[in-house]
Image (cartoon, helix red, strand yellow):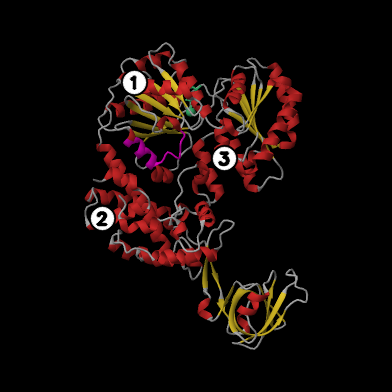
């Protein structure tokens, strides 16, 4: 249970004065729903409102705070509020006249706040002309200097939230911070020159200059370190516990796996053989398997995963494979069923589409142990699903399946051996922060029969011409060449994107007749499957698709991929898409069509696609081009983002935190010492509840 002192920080933002449901919803979108999320939402900049005591200090167009005595009001004759209302004043601290201009004014308000003869302080953007100051809509009107902040934090915002409002809320939270014991090592803290946690938060939210908002400032470094340490400590904790925890021990398979491998229509790559052995050994040992399998698209992860599932089945348990989407689950189901043909293994599929009686039957059979391998979407881990005895779980391409989810699964299915698979190359930093609790296996070799993909970049204007050429080639090819034609579908512009895909479909129909199909995300499952299946069966030559085919779907006959507006895709996305072709022995081609004008960076990115097929190289180059702004494509990859730490400039802290976490658990595995107790607070602050529950008693 979270220590009660911390509860105040986990209250909803609606508990703050001035924050209603609507604001809370916006805040949730911006940073989160609890008070702690406000604290962890740091300013990105600082505004300096210079207190002007001499005319020469004013720079036109900058924020200034000026003391004045109101001399006269120039209300517009007409009561139309669109006409500006002017108020003239005389500066107190130096001889000059100041004119305040208001649009959309309320006369009552202005006469109350800026009564003739009153001395007030105003702050806003000032313009100077001929020794006169003009200020449109002051941001602040106060009775004296102290009523207006000299420095003001500027927060990353969303429409409907202002920095001023946010700063006010943050101030309330800062005033009620609970006193917490120091969890960092004192000598280390002193050496770094970092403040304590409370001071760090205060300083981070009240920057006085630009270096205060830089990620190198001591306050920010401290906060980032806390977050990284909490993360690495949670991972290390989980790892230690998991290592010791008895997993379901699955003896090496003598029958099913050999039978599967003998029946394969291809030779395993050396990498596949190595990884299959790593997994088999891990499963047959007493500890619980927690393993990450990295392998580029097309490296042959499915068969590797299947050996793990079969080892569980042969040992009298069940296996489950979870895919990110319905269509992928179905494809896995089909390819696995094919691989298991003639073997005594009972498989079933479970997604949101299995309903009513059929669903009930599956669930009953599963609980009775009458299903050996279940394949599906996240439905397979919901509470309604009860396994007879789950021995191995494989999670495919689910980057959101983070450490918390892994722990929750282990709690639900005690002793389950877990294999997570990803085709997204994971750079070292991210592997450390997201998968530090897992062992690694890497498929770094593609099946030998793969031919290099001929990738070309051309203008979208050439689309028609290209289609005609493809038709010509198609007529001559045996077996008949099939073409994926991908149109982008970006969430923000869904409607127009969909219309564009529809239009392309129609124009391709003019060329390919009824041998063209269209699939997109708005289509219903069965409808989509029907089109996909026709393409798979070779009844369609061209499949126009939005990005629904992005991961996993396998059509061996497809050897050409056209990607429209390729510049709108991330490199990782393009790489995944291209991985759909070049799977058989035929020559394959990928045509990247770009919309004009093409920016320099976009051009460079497409060039990388042309030059390499190596997912790791692509990821690295992508990072270089992004210039660290979105480090390692974290956002794109869907991998976890930190709230406070910015790995592009605080990456070295990560390594220190990783060492620190190791050292802590070596000397105090149950976090019982004084520092250990303090570290528990840290874990809760960063919502590592699962790690504490699982890792400590
Ligand atoms: P991944 O999931 O890693 O992207 P898949 O497991 O879907 O890749 O495999 C892609 C295709 O390659 C499948 O059609 C599969 O049958 C085939 N395949 C897998 N391993 C080999 C191999 N060693 N040699 C030839 N083809 C293979
Ligand atoms: Mg796959």
Residue 245 sits above or below residue 145 on the image = above
Say few, some or many: other residues with alpha carbon within 10 Å of mark 2 (under 14 / 14 to 19 / 20 or more): some
The mark found on residue 368 in the picture is 1
Q: Are marks 3 and 2 in contact (CB under 8 Å)?
A: no
| Residue that badge 2 annotates | 677
Task: Report helix, strand or loop for mark 1.
Answer: helix
Residue 176 picture quarter? bottom left
Q: Position of residue 54 (x, y in %)?
A: 60, 85
Residue at (48%, 68%) from the top-left corner? 207
User: Is residue 689 among the parts visible in the rendering?
Assistant: yes
Answer with mark 3 or mark 2, whichever residue precedes in sequence: 3
Residue 401: within the magenta?
yes
| Residue that badge 3 annotates | 571
Q: Does mark 2's beta carbon lie closer than 8 Å to ligand 2?
A: no
The number of discs equals 3
Q: Which residues are magenta?
A: 396-411
Residue 156: within the magenta?
no
Front label number (3 vs 2): 2
The CA span between labels 3 and 1 is 45 Å
């Amino acid at each position: 249970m979270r220590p009660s002192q911390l509860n105040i920080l986990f209250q909803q933002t609606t508990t703050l004065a001035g924050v209603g449901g609507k604001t809370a919803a916006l805040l949730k979108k911006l940073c989160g729903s609890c008070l702690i999320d406000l604290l962890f939402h740091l300013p990105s900049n600082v505004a300096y409102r210079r207190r002007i005591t001499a005319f020469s200090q004013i720079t036109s167009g900058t924020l200034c705070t000026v003391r004045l005595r109101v001399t006269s009001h120039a209300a517009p004759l007409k009561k139309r509020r669109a006409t500006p209302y002017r108020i003239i004043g005389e500066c107190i601290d130096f001889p000059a006249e100041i004119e305040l201009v208001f649009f959309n004014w309320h006369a009552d308000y202005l006469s109350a706040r800026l009564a003739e003869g009153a001395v007030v302080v105003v702050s806003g953007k000032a313009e100077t002309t001929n020794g006169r100051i003009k200020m449109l809509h002051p941001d602040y009107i106060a009775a004296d200097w102290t009523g207006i902040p000299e420095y003001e934090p500027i927060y990353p915002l969303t429409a409907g939230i202002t920095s001023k409002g946010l700063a006010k809320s943050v101030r309330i939270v800062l005033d009620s911070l609970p006193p917490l014991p120091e969890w960092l090592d004192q000598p280390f803290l002193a050496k770094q020159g970092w403040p304590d946690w409370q001071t760090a938060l205060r300083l981070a939210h009240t920057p006085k200059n630009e270096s205060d908002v830089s990620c190198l400032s001591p306050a920010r470094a401290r906060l980032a370190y806390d977050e990284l340490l909490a993360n690495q400590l949670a991972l290390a904790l989980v790892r230690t516990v998991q290592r010791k925890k008895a997993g379901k021990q699955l003896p090496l398979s003598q029958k099913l796996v050999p039978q599967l491998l003998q029946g394969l229509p291809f030779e395993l790559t050396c990498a596949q053989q190595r990884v299959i052995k790593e997994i088999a050994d891990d499963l047959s040992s007493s500890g619980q398997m927690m393993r990450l399998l990295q392998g580029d698209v097309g490296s042959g992860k499915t068969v590797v995963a299947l050996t793990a599932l079969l080892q569980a089945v042969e040992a009298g348990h069940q296996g489950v494979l979870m895919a990110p989407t319905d269509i992928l689950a179905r494809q896995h189901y089909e390819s696995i069923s094919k691989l298991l043909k003639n073997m005594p293994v009972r498989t079933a599929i479970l997604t949101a589409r299995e309903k009513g009686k059929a669903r009930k039957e599956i669930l009953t059979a599963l609980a009775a142990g009458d299903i050996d391998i279940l394949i599906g979407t996240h439905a397979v881990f919901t509470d309604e699903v009860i396994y007879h005895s789950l021995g191995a779980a494989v999670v495919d391409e689910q980057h959101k399946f983070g450490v918390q989810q892994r722990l929750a699964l282990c709690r639900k299915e005690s002793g389950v051996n877990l294999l997570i698979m990803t085709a997204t190359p994971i750079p070292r930093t991210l592997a450390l922060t997201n998968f530090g609790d897992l062992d690694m296996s890497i498929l770094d070799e593609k099946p030998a029969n793969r031919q290099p993909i001929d990738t070309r970049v051309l203008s979208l204007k050439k689309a028609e011409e290209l289609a005609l050429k493809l038709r010509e080639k198609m007529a001559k090819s045996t077996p008949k060449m099939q073409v994926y034609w991908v149109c982008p579908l970006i969430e923000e512009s869904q409607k127009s994107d969909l219309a564009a895909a529809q239009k392309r479909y129609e124009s391709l129909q003019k060329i390919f007749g009824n041998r063209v199909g269209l699939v997109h995300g708005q289509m219903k499952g069965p409808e989509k499957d029907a089109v996909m299946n026709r393409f798979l069966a070779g009844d369609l030559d061209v499949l126009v698709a939005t990005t629904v085919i992005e991961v996993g779907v396998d059509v061996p006959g497809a050897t050409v991929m056209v990607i429209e507006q390729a510049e709108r895709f991330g490199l990782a996305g393009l790489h995944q898409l291209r991985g759909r072709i070049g799977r058989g022995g035929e020559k394959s081609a990928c045509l990247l069509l770009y919309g004009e004008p093409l920016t320099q960076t976009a051009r460079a990115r497409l060039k990388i696609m042309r030059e390499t097929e190596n997912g790791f190289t692509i990821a690295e180059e992508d990072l270089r081009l992004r210039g660290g702004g979105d480090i390692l494509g974290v956002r794109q990859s869907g991998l976890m983002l930190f709230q406070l730490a910015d790995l592009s400039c605080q990456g070295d802290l990560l390594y220190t935190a990783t060492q620190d976490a190791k050292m802590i658990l070596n000397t105090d595995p149950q976090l019982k010492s004084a520092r250990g107790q303090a570290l528990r607070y840290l874990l809760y602050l960063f919502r590592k509840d699962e790690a504490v529950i699982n890792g400590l008693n």
